[in-house]
Amino acid sequence: MAEPQTTVTPRATDYSQWYLDVIAQAELADYSPVKGCMVFRPHGFAIWDHMRTDLDRRFKETGHVNAYFPMLIPVSFLSKEAEHVEGFAKECAVVTHHRLRMAAGGGVEPDPASKLEEPLVIRPTSETIIWHMYGQWIQSWRDLPILINQWANIVRWEMKTRPFLRTAEFLWQEGHTAHATSAEAVEETTRMLDVYEAFARDMLAMPVVKGVKSASERFAGAVDTYCIEALMQNGWALQAGTSHFLGQNFAKAFDVTFQTTAGDREHVWATSWGVSTRMIGAVIMTHSDDTGLVLPPAVAPIQVVVTPIWKTDAEKDVVLAHAEKVRAALYPHFRVKVDARDTMKPGAKYFEWERKGVPLRLEIGPRDVAGDSVFAALRTGGKKFGIPAGDVVVGVTEALAAIQRSLYEAAVARRDATMRTPSDYTAFKADIERGGFVSVPWTDDAANEATIKEETKATIRCYPLTGQDDAQGKLCFYSGRPATHIALFARAF
Amino acid sequence: MAEPQTTVTPRATDYSQWYLDVIAQAELADYSPVKGCMVFRPHGFAIWDHMRTDLDRRFKETGHVNAYFPMLIPVSFLSKEAEHVEGFAKECAVVTHHRLRMAAGGGVEPDPASKLEEPLVIRPTSETIIWHMYGQWIQSWRDLPILINQWANIVRWEMKTRPFLRTAEFLWQEGHTAHATSAEAVEETTRMLDVYEAFARDMLAMPVVKGVKSASERFAGAVDTYCIEALMQNGWALQAGTSHFLGQNFAKAFDVTFQTTAGDREHVWATSWGVSTRMIGAVIMTHSDDTGLVLPPAVAPIQVVVTPIWKTDAEKDVVLAHAEKVRAALYPHFRVKVDARDTMKPGAKYFEWERKGVPLRLEIGPRDVAGDSVFAALRTGGKKFGIPAGDVVVGVTEALAAIQRSLYEAAVARRDATMRTPSDYTAFKADIERGGFVSVPWTDDAANEATIKEETKATIRCYPLTGQDDAQGKLCFYSGRPATHIALFARAF
């Protein structure tokens, strides 16, 4: 990706290539020499930094604290929860040695004398190590709840990768909570799902459907997996976050009990919940266009770029001074940058910042200086307009809010326009082919689910939390049996 | 550490045990089932969060941006820089497989079929992977400088560990910059050293000596290693941060050249610099006392604890209401907590928050409610005093500032009182035994340095940046040859 082309492949031509082009041209990421691992370049990483800051605040407001647990986990820990090891064993990076030695043919190699007695895996998720520690910390009801979050890197070995969406190493947060009752744990699970929904809506301008997974799509070791599902522009769904009610599974696997107020000993109830750098991919795919990256102002690394325009040296002095005045007015309310490079023409600068997804451009030429104003162009299009320099803070505030709102509304409209309710399997297949969410009455059945996935590549994204009453009295669109759920199907990343 | 004792071992009795007791009782950290890896408990991790936030701001103010590079590095990359591989090969965790399989005797084991063609190491530092990427990004002088920082976890396999100070996995930041000229790179190296010094002083209330390392203590692959050295209460030094001028070593190893403005191709100049969670250990050892943890307010997870005191239910309602009023006045200016637990007596609460290093306690009893005031107790001691409730923000601001200042002054005084200048090796040995920094005229000589280390366990902490002129005309205290430097020796963690 080191040498970006000058234009991106249009979405209609090749959606996958469009996604890679948008990333390359915005300099969000790069490939690395390690198969499946990516490099987060500064412009891409800054998006994550803004997500992290906002999420961290939301976690603290809901009573959580951060901690950090070891990345290396003894393999025997994974085995303690039967479904968990089944789910993760096949994608674990395994550390077997703790030293290198000079190799006979030059270079270095693992020193056989440093072979570990028990191999370690790099965490694919941290339930096991954390529940081992909770076993040391929890004695009685007084020690509950524990409401801990961790920001960490994760490794899940993937053969087929896609930047941000699926990589061997990724960054995420993982909440791990311990409770005295089932009800309290379930409440925590849905509370965090609500936090994710609000975050996606307010920060990412991304509407999501909240729901619960079918058994086949459940997290390995969970009783229930709740999720938020978003719709990308190609009509595929993307799971953007999950919140698991773990029941007492991990407490039993690690024998974590507590003394109740009544004096009994019971196993502790658990939740875990996480979102990852995959969210960056979701944002890119939700909003970007055939010119390149489009970012919601709330997470844009640069929200406003000021581009001075001049022809003569005398003009240059004047427009740069005006640009600096505008920048000083906007900072630190906004993330603002003045592009004063004299190695590029204005048009080339505009194009560069458009490809990088900067929501708002303020052009300043001699005429704007004379009028004591700026000329505003929105990344999302529309007619350019002047803002008096004295009103620039208000003007920028309103423009960014309008962009954030319009991106959200466009995403909602796109999703709703493609939400379909076919009445039989033939219509279902056609609707899946067209893209978008497909909502159907459904009788929970793993075998039928597998057949449909095999035949259409569509999976149950979730049983939405709202509207399940509609299943009553309906028949399953596929099996004809009395429906147990309203299911949302789609092809998914 | 799950069951802390009620008191810490006094420093004079057993300094090492004191350190472990302070950590355990403040619930800063815990041991993990993985040898050498520790768990950062919430109260300990919050200190790092505050450090990180402040450092990140300082890095951005000096023009740096964050990025993220893969944690897994091909072993062949390490070999490219000869000194680098020499320095790190013996402490690398090596990933050799990417999948587990069910083992015959139960449990799981690395799947032999998943053996990697080339083993990967978990980064012990990231120069190699980053300079590989810089090779893709740097073509001409227009691409320079690159000023990137990364927040990451690191693994350096250690046999003998100590919480925060030396652990197999730790957290840090690593800056990696690329420059067109040597002078610019050196300027960056010292700029970041200054940033670390200011951070240590302003946030950690910890005075440091800035200096440059002797060749034997240099980072593997650096031309010069600059450092900040702090003095702990037992008279040992602690390296709290380093900033390396890497010259063109990594650019040559990874063949990274750029086109100069004159049209030539030259190798790029580099720096790297980092501080780690070791800083938490430095803070603990600099300020804590025989009661437990003492923290500078700037990094204290809780700065103010409000402890309501009551005997009757009627009193309880009134003092809790008053405590809430005080909390509301202090929030969000300060990190404040009301301890309203009715399961503990006030004395026990005081002791708990003292052990946890909360700088300021505000007691509120019925008499304080009647007087519309609070009764303030500083963790650093002194007579308790009243603050009118209406002045509580000002009063707390002043009290915390006074604590921060007094901790810094005490640390400076301790360091200066033990700074010695022996005139010969006999006196030197006695001074090293007493503890503290020992400043001597010195002729740079690796063999003599090794002998002194062997005989006294003291190492050259640095050649201080200031006062080197004093070496002129002096003779080395050890060899009697004309001195090349003023060297600061000490035993060190």
Image (spheres, coloured by chain):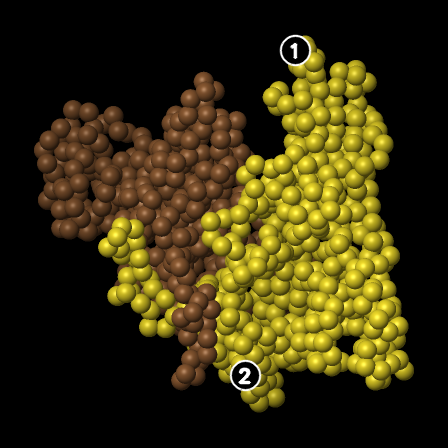
Chain colours: A brown, B yellow
Identified by mark 2, the residue type is Lys
Give whichever of B242, B132 is nearer the camera. Answer: B242
- Residue B389 can be seen, yes or no: no
- Residue under numbered circle 2: B252
Snapshot quadrant of residue A285? bottom left
Residue A374, compared with residue A56, is above or below; it is below
Q: Nearer the viewer, residue A234 or A96?
A: A96
The image shows residue B327, relative to residue B187, as above or below, that is above
**Chain under callout 2:** B
Quadrant hosting residue B302: top right
The chain identifier of the residue carrying mark 1 reads: B
Q: How many marks?
A: 2
Please state which of residues A363 and A155 is positioned toward the viewer in this rendering: A155
Residue receiving disc 1: B313
The residue nearer to you, when weighing A127 against B433, is B433
Tag 2, which secondary structure?
helix
Q: Do residues under tags 2 and 1 come within 8 Å of each other at their CB atoms?
A: no
Mark 1 Cα shell of 10 Å, populated few (<14), some (14-19), many (≥20): few
For the point 53% across and 51% down, which residue is it? Answer: B38
The percent coordinates of residue A6 (x first, y second) are: 41, 71
Residue A191 tag number? none
Same subunit under labels 2 and 1?
Answer: yes
**Point 74% across, 59% down: residue:** B236
